[in-house]
Amino acid sequence: MAATGSEKQGAKAYYVSTPIYYVNDAPHLGHAYTTVAGDVLTRWHRQRGEKVWYLTGTDEHGQKIMRTAEANGVSPQEWCDKLVEEAWKPLWEHLNIANDDFIRTTEKRHTDRVQEFVQDLYDKGEIYKGGYEGPYCVGCEEYKLPGDLIDGEGEYAGQKLCPIHKRPVEILKEENYFFKLSEYGPKLLEFYEANPGFIQPESARNEVVNFAKQGLQDLSISRSTFDWGVPVPWDEKHVIYVWIDALLNYATAVGYNENPAKFEETFPANVHLIGKDILRFHAIIWPAMLMANDLPVPGRVACNGWLMVGGEKMSKSNLTGIKPQDLTSHFGVDAYRWYFLRAISFGQDGSFSWEDFTARYTSELANDYGNLASRVAAMVGKYFGGALPEATASGEAEKAVQAGMAKAAAEADRKIGEELDFQGGILAVLDFVKQVNGYITEQEPWKVAKDESPEGQARLATILYTAAESLRAVAVLLNPVMPVTSQALWDSLGAEAPLGALADQRVQRAGEWGGLPAGVTVTKGAVLFPRLEELKKD
Ligand code: MSP
């Protein structure tokens, strides 16, 4: 297995990155999907007590951005500044993304280091000058292999199209600098073999291994027909290929050649989260670049599947017309963060529908989870004046709940923290919520309450303690996914005074029974998941 955070020595940070996004337009549901997944993963590891570094940012050079800026009549830098400040950063804030840094590839801290990295490769003889002619897709910012192209139809009849963007490729002929990628094929294959967990999921790993086995071509790493990029330091008529520039963000943002202590403590990433469209860049080119410069390679490259619209990857040109904010204003930010990870198995493609989101919200969040929290708080208020009673009469039914809680916590920690199986981890917790609901239905505390004998009251106290203590674990385990509602539950349980801040609760200990002490003040807070307003049907 590849190294993971817990295997790193000493005070190494658990370092997770998102792709840095092209700022040719505002973020859409697909971008937010990757970024929320990374946020949940890093919040999970923070709650394990690990040092964590979560990086996101924007990819601002290259022809695609340059042409968009031109079409909008502004300079590329102005275009990027506007989009980053008005669209990208505000969305991450709105979605409660707790990134530790935000790198922009037009920042000097990045461009200087990119030049140094490439200069080092040049000095080592890893880069040479040569010519290349081939089909290029500006959407991908990539030369395509002729065999990868598809035949155009309709308005594109007779032309060759990029299989991802479904637009004609351009034939580029340039004198460029080349990186000797072809020499790294055997070394990469050896590395994949020794680190079977490096590429996730299995299908992505197979694709990369098969591709590398066919033999790699050297990679053109400079462009001379436009100038929106980082100049090649020894030949300023060229700019560095946007993908080389972009991949290096993972190093420059954590102190490469600038802050050795920070770099040492953070690099390389434990997990690069990416969409499968950019797999080869991350699983072939990036490790080869690092090997060539004697730097350590990342622990894992994990692909999420695509959010689809009408059978195609959701992209700028085929959006649903639904913005992340349209969904958060209807369902709330927490439910938004939860929905895509809950509904789609990570690594698989999935699609969004209002109907599915509404049905899951109503049954799993509002009815199962929200109702449990409000019922328990209401009963502790009604029968015990809000002071959580002690459990003195536990029996088989309580043992089953305790075992369910331990299992849910262990499963969630393994699935989310290790396997990046967000759906499985969330389901483990929601199944436990179902179990506790079933327990209350069976125990019928409202009937037990009528028995005023000491035994009856002891049973009532035990049932309500059991339910409240279960909710404590649920709040801790769902906090990385839904931080706002988990905090509301934490407050309602009066847990902060005896146990401290929710974010400081350890996920790996959440399943240990008895954390919430008797005597805490339980209050009925705001409803966690309000009923949804009727959707307006157009
Ligand atoms: N700038 C490059 C990445 C450089 S990383 C060194 C790039 N940017 S992008 O904006 O086009 O998209 C990046 C990522 O956004 C995808 O890899 C994926 O993680 C996410 N997604 C974009 N559309 C998506 C979907 N429809 N579905 C799921 N994820 C999507 O490529």
Image (tube, rainbow, N blue to C red):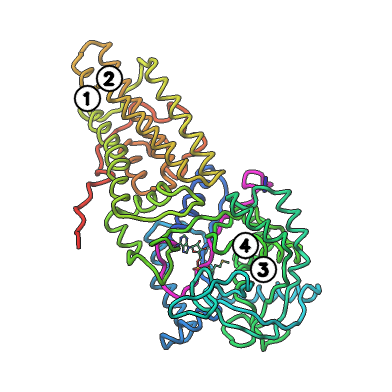
Image x and y of residue 312, in percent: 44, 63
**If you read the primary sequence from the N terminus, does the residue marked by circle 3 or circle 4 appear first?**
3
Q: Given this view, does label 4 or label 2 mark the residue nearer the observer?
A: 4
Marking on residue 258:
3
Q: What SS does tag 4 mark?
A: helix
Query: Rounded to the nearest whole Å, what is the CA distance between mark 1 and mark 4?
Result: 58 Å
Residue 298 in sight here: yes
Image x and y of residue 336, in percent: 36, 53
**If you read the primary sequence from the N terminus, does the residue marked by circle 2 or circle 3 appear first?**
3
Type of amino acid under label 1: Tyr
Type of amino acid under label 3: Glu
Cβ–Cβ under 8 Å for marks 2 and 1: yes
Instruction: Name the residue nearer the viewer: 400 or 476.
Output: 400
Residue 109 in sight here: no
Query: Rounded to the nearest whole Å, what is the CA distance between mark 2 and mark 3?
Result: 62 Å
Type of amino acid under label 2: Leu
Q: What SS does tag 3 mark?
A: loop
Q: What SS does tag 1 mark?
A: helix
Marking on residue 282:
4
**If you read the primary sequence from the N terminus, does the residue marked by circle 1 or circle 3 appear first?**
3
Marking on residue 460:
2
Image x and y of residue 38, in percent: 50, 54
> What is the span of residues highlighted in magenta in the rendered image?
4-30
Left or right of 209: which side holds 402? left
| Residue holding disc 1 | 383
Image x and y of residue 66, in percent: 51, 83
Instruction: Name the residue nearer the viewer: 12 or 26.
Output: 26
